[in-house]
Amino acid sequence: MTEKQSVISARNLDLTFQTNDGPVHALKDVNLEIKDGDFVSFIGPSGCGKTTFLRVMADLEQPTGGTVTVNGVSPEEARRQRAYGYVFQAAGLYPWRTIGGNIRLPLEIMGVPKSEQAERVNRVLELVELAGFEKKFPWQLSGGMQQRASIARALSFDADILLMDEPFGALDEIVRDHLNEQLLHLWERTGKTIAFVTHSIPEAVYLSTKIVVMSPRPGRITDVIDSPLPKDRPLDIRDTPEFLEVAHRVREGLRAGHQDD
């Protein structure tokens, strides 16, 4: 079997914010490899640097030590190459634009021809099961549908990497379960590499091929768990001993991180 390529690589990564109250050590000595096609979840307590790490990958924050590469180049170069799509915690849709208009926005900025824009919008709406909603406005959609539209927008320019910052955190459990299932199907169909921030142990275990457990600030990686679960995961897999065993290891990793602090 061919060795999968490394897509995101962090080496001895540090990040310290300078504030009026003194330095804040957000990340410390982070080392991680994310391979092509991986679904990697980052979990840890609030303020542990999960989102900061994602933002470093996206060139939205600059490390103060160590290195990060995305597709073998700097995050800045990867951003210029449009190597990734980014999904934020809030859907961030413009209320005056239709769903189709919101999804077209990055394509308009990129100068994609109008005929191709329409084809891409239709394709990504199909992927997130929102076909037929392109003429609706965000306020006409539920929170879960708005978040799916946000994912469609991130998919519109067909980047191989999807960075997702707790996209389902504000949704109720029933909607969240449904979107988890849909996201897994989307990942299977597209083969994209996904880096996903969450506070939910069941969500991290259900979605991921690899779970990265982080400590309280300064954010360090306390455990990296390769999931033994099969790729095909119905929701009721969460009741199996295998699932509960992984969830227990995540919980232990979180507890150990607090004790080490």
Image (cartoon, helix red, strand yellow):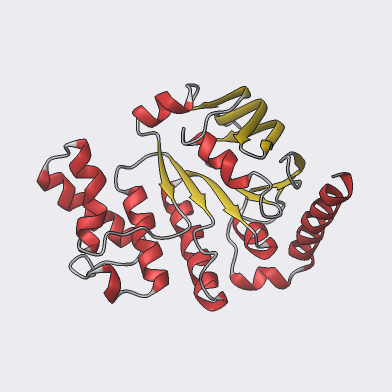
Q: Residue 200 location in percent, x, y?
A: 65, 62
Closer to us: 7 or 190: 7
Q: Residue 131 location in percent, x, y?
A: 26, 66
Whether residue 121 is visible:
yes
Q: Is residue 77 above or below residue 147?
A: above
Q: Is residue 200 above or below residue 72?
A: below
191 lies left or right of 107: right
Q: Quadrant of the N terminus?
A: top right
Q: Is residue 169 above or below residue 39?
A: below
Q: Residue 33 location in percent, x, y?
A: 63, 32
Whether residue 36 is visible:
no
Quarter of the figure with residue 136: bottom left
Q: Looking at the image, which residue sits at the far front?
A: 20
Report the number of discs. Answer: 0
Q: Quadrant of the C terminus?
A: top right
Q: Looking at the image, which residue sits at the far right?
A: 259
261 lies left or right of 124: right
Q: Residue 11 location in percent, x, y?
A: 66, 24
Q: Is residue 98 above or below residue 223?
A: below
Which residue does the image show at 33% across and 61% down from the upper left? 149
52 lies left or right of 221: left
Which residue does the image show at 39% across and 60% down from the upper left? 91
Which residue does the image show at 58% across and 60% down from the upper left? 232
Which residue does the image show at 53% across and 70% down from the upper left? 176
Closer to us: 4 or 118: 118
